[in-house]
Amino acid sequence: MKRGKIIKVSGPLVVAEGIPGIRMYDIVRVSEKRLIGEVIEIRGDRSWIQVYEETTGLGPGEPVETTGRPLSVELGPGLIEAIYDGIQRPLDAIAAEGGDRVTRGIEVPALPRDKKWEFTPHLSEGALVQPGDILGVVQETTLVEHKIMVPPGVEGRLVQIKAGAFTVEEIIAKVETKDGIQELALMQRWPVRRERPYGKKLAPTQPLTTGQRSIDTFFPVAQGGTAAIPGPFGSGKTVVQHQLAKWASADIIVYVGCGERGNEMTDVLNEFPRLKDPKSGEPLMKRTVLVANTSDMPVAAREASIYTGITIAEYFRDMGFSVAIMADSTSRWAEALREMSGRLEEMPGEEGYPAYLGSRLADFYERAGRVVCLGNPQREGSITAVGAVSPPGGDLSEPVTQATLRVVKVFWGLDSALAYRRHFPAINWLNSYSLYEDRLDEYYRREVGEEWLTLRNRAMRLLQEEAELEEIVRLVGVDALSDHDQLVLEIARSIREDFLHQNAFHEVDTYTSLTKQYKLLRLVMAFYGVGQRLLKEGVSLAKIRDLPIREEIGRAKYLPEDRLDGIDRLYDELMAYTGETLGGGEKDA
């Protein structure tokens, strides 16, 4: 085979010349070590290649050959519970073959070739099939029934289909197309930079429930929506994403650790197998795919890891699943873009990032959405994309954060001041927002409670009033405020401490159902309403503050989901209070 040769090496960037038949985004093998690289620029006879492995020791004159195909992922049974690097190499298989460190040039298939999967056909010979039709199913894990679909571009008459146990490479069906017989296996390949086709996009009308009160109640994200979590170091971005991965109402979780610290990915790998899925009681790993590309791994592979993750998510979406993809963090991904852009000597944009930063971020987030899938039976699937952003020094005006906010519709802004006060999740309720609220309000009113919208708006208004009153308190002290304003401060504190504050490591408080969130917020707001009434009836503010039920309201969030009648009891008891029974008309001491 005729091969090209290296003429320049600059870190992860290699320049080669004379590669026959080379095309943009082709995968090439670099040097005798057969390192994996991707062509990102072509000028005349020269090709610029980003190498996804360590290039130490490479020099001019070494051979480069093309594989003739773009960077693609293998899609089929075996994805669930797998742990991949940024270019879909299974880390457990690499560890078994080459030890704890990733050996350069190692070639390991993404899906196991020796494992047999029990395939149950859903179609019979003679059926007319088109892209997306479900040929049959494989029970991949106890939680995931893996649907084997006709790949895009294949259409015709099914002339053969077999039942039984097969490896991912064995032929299970044959389709007679206009171009001849097409053989189908359990596995298919798809280029990561190309969006998988679907029928049509649908409006987001259902929430992705997360069990996190500050998110579900105040700043919800829809199934098929996009969200960003910007925040400075130590504000809890990773823990919030872990919580979403654990408790979000998605069928499949794809977690992409993109350039983050290795110990954070270690926490995920250690914790997920132990955690139980709240709906089934099975380990969470049985519906999770992990892509781990830590900060000490080659920088170029960070860029690929995002595309690898979103392509796997699209594959499960096409089966009709609700998929949530967590990218932690897109700032590290953007830093990889900046490094490669600098080595390519491109004209830098703001803060050195490439001019195409915004369009690349949009390419990723726009692949989310709720869609009608191709093929029969008709089904809907969705991808919800949540990206963490790590702005240097917490500066939300930096380019990655601003480019992200132009694309996403939910902004969960983490605040270092809240984190310093140990208020977690440290989502700042004054500058965060969700553009899905109007679309989701009908769902909340119908499925949770008629007063949902009213309670949320009143609570948010009290939090905003508190921020305004705190400015006055700093100037003249709290005693200068009227009893009503002091009651507002008390209730706002209750909303913050008894509702918004949530302990991710408490077995009960880590997850709160929508019904419990509604009852908790109704209880807190009822205390405000009763407090206003008691003030009018002459009860002193001190006596209202010291009501025994006040402490019980604070402990209500720790009631298990099967004891929510305890919150209803507190609500009824609270509504029974009157100024007469409390000895109204007494003066404050």
Image (cartoon, helix red, strand yellow):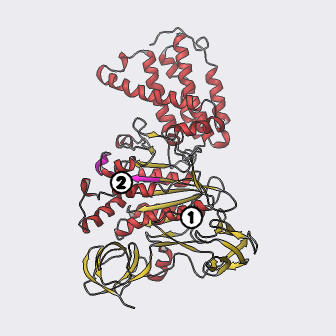
Q: Position of residue 462 (x, y in %)?
A: 46, 26
Magenta stretch: residue 390 in it? yes
Residue reaching furthest to the bottom: 1
Q: Is residue 338 visible?
A: yes
Q: Position of residue 199 (x, y in %)?
A: 59, 57
Residue occupying image coordinates x 52% and y 10%: 538
Of the residues shown, which amino acid type is indicated by label 2? Gly
Out of 413 and 495, give the one closest to the viewer: 413
- In the image, is 226 to the left or to the right of 402? right
- In the image, is 293 to the left or to the right of 214? left
Q: Quadrant of residue 280?
A: bottom right
Q: Quadrant of residue 197?
A: bottom right
- Magenta stretch? 386-395
Of the residues shown, which amino acid type is indicated by label 1? Tyr
- The residue that mark 1 highlights is 315
First reached walking from the N terminus: tag 2 or tag 1:
1
Q: Position of residue 13 (x, y in %)?
A: 29, 73
Asked if 152 appears above or below 527 in the picture, the reply is below
- The residue that mark 2 highlights is 358
Residue occupying image coordinates x 67% and y 42%: 562
